[in-house]
Structure formats: structure tokens, C-alpha cells
Image (cartoon, rainbow, N blue to C red):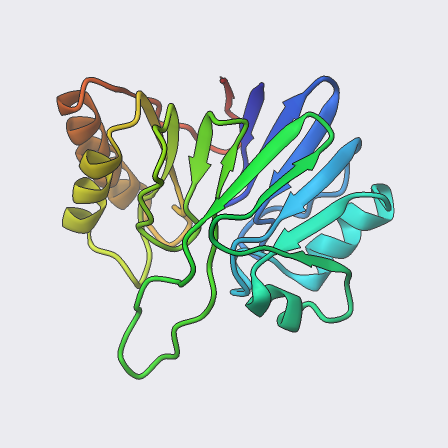
Amino acid sequence: MRLTKHEHACLVLELAEQRLVIDPGSFTTPLIDIKDVVAIVITHEHPDHWTPEQLTRLLDRNPHAQVFGPPGVATAAADFTITTVRDGDRAVAGPFELEFFGEKHAVIHESIPVIDNVGVMVNGTLFYPGDAFTVPTVPVDTLAVPAGAPWLKISEVMDYVSAVAAKRTFPTHQMVLSKIGQRMANDRIELVTKKSGGEFFPLEPADVLAL
């Protein structure tokens, strides 16, 4: 399986010449040329993780792609056909086996409602938590680590990496950080990853990782 990192929280996975897109949001360059998409996963309704424009671009090119998301996404994206998923659900789309974990977005502030959020495990290899610190109930080979956001601080990120203890990690959710901030977050994530015996990959947009 081949993973391509896009800006912010968007990932594209490729296997057997078919693709899975995760969280095509507003902080990601328009996805205009991605074909052979069999599924799209939207972890939650915030616009940095999906927009109607990004979803429309993908579905215009890939009209048979299935879109998965929690109940909040199904409500926010009511103009689209969304397959609603919750914690514990499983699904198959082309060569991709999906397992969903978690229920809610991390708390941003007590004044802001907590929305639905699901993390996704792909082919028992990659776990992407969305905007949460969900620890799956199964071992994780490769963890996509949120690196910067209004809902996190770096000590929580480090604790999360330690709790999951994945063999490999790489950063996501970076567009809210300066270049200096990204390097600082990467250093901290790498430190804890190595302490757990894993390997860190400081992926930038367009970088590829073989899984």
C-alpha cells in the first residue's frame, strides 16, 4: 500500500491501482486529478477536513466512490450520499478494509460543542484518528499523528504517541503551524516514537510512504 501525504490532514492511499482519500478539506490544495477512487473517509464535519467543493471534485471524477463519515458528517453533508459509520463498524471498499474507532472530537473549549469524530484503521496497518486522541483496541503499525491544532498541546501529542506505540509515525494536521512550529512538533513526535522503538517519518505534502 502506498500513502501520499497532502497538505494538512488529507491522505491518499493506493493499492491495486485503486485509491482511498481521507479528509479532503479546505487547507488542502484542490484535488482535481485523483482518479480510481473507491472510497472517501471524512472523520468529522470541520471544513479543514472536508468541503463540498473538494468532495464534489472527487465525486465528479469518481462517481461510484463511497463516502464514509460519522452521523455529524451525514448531517453536514446532507446533499451527498454518506454511509454513516460509528465506533466498532467495519467496511470494505475495493482493496481497502476499514475499521472505525472513537466517537467524539477532542474538546476545543467548554463553550464549543463537541462534535462526532471517527478514526479509521486501513487494512490493519494505518491508523488515522481525525481530531482526537483515540487509542485503537488493536496494534498499530503506522500512526498519523496530529501535530498542531486548537484542541491539542504537544505534551498531549507525545503522550498519545507513547500510548499507541506504533512502529512508524508521521505528522498530520500541520497547516496551523509555522515552519518553525512544524520542526518543533516533529522533534517531539520523533523523540517519543523512538523511545517506543518506532521510526518517525517527517512527511511533507507530496511525500510518499510505502506501508
116 shown above or below 21: below
Q: Indicate the position of residue 85 as horizontal and vertical percent values.
A: 59, 55
Quadrant where the N terminus is found in the figure: top right
Vertical placement of residue 120 versus 149, above or below: above
- Near-viewer residue (142 or 48): 142
Picture quadrant of residue 55: bottom right
Look at 41% across and 53% down and name the residue there.
102
Q: Judge by depth and name the residue closer to the eye, 200 or 174.
A: 200
Regarding residue 18, the answer to whether it shows in the image is yes
In the figure, residue 195 lies in which quadrant?
top left
Q: Residue at x 19, y 17 (%)?
A: 197
Q: Is residue 69 left or right of residue 31?
A: left
- In the rendered image, the residue lying farthest to the bottom is 111
**Residue 150: x %, y % from top left:** 31, 63
Residue 47 position by quadrant: bottom right
Q: Nearer the viewer, residue 101 or 203?
A: 101
Relative to 65, 147 lies left or right: left
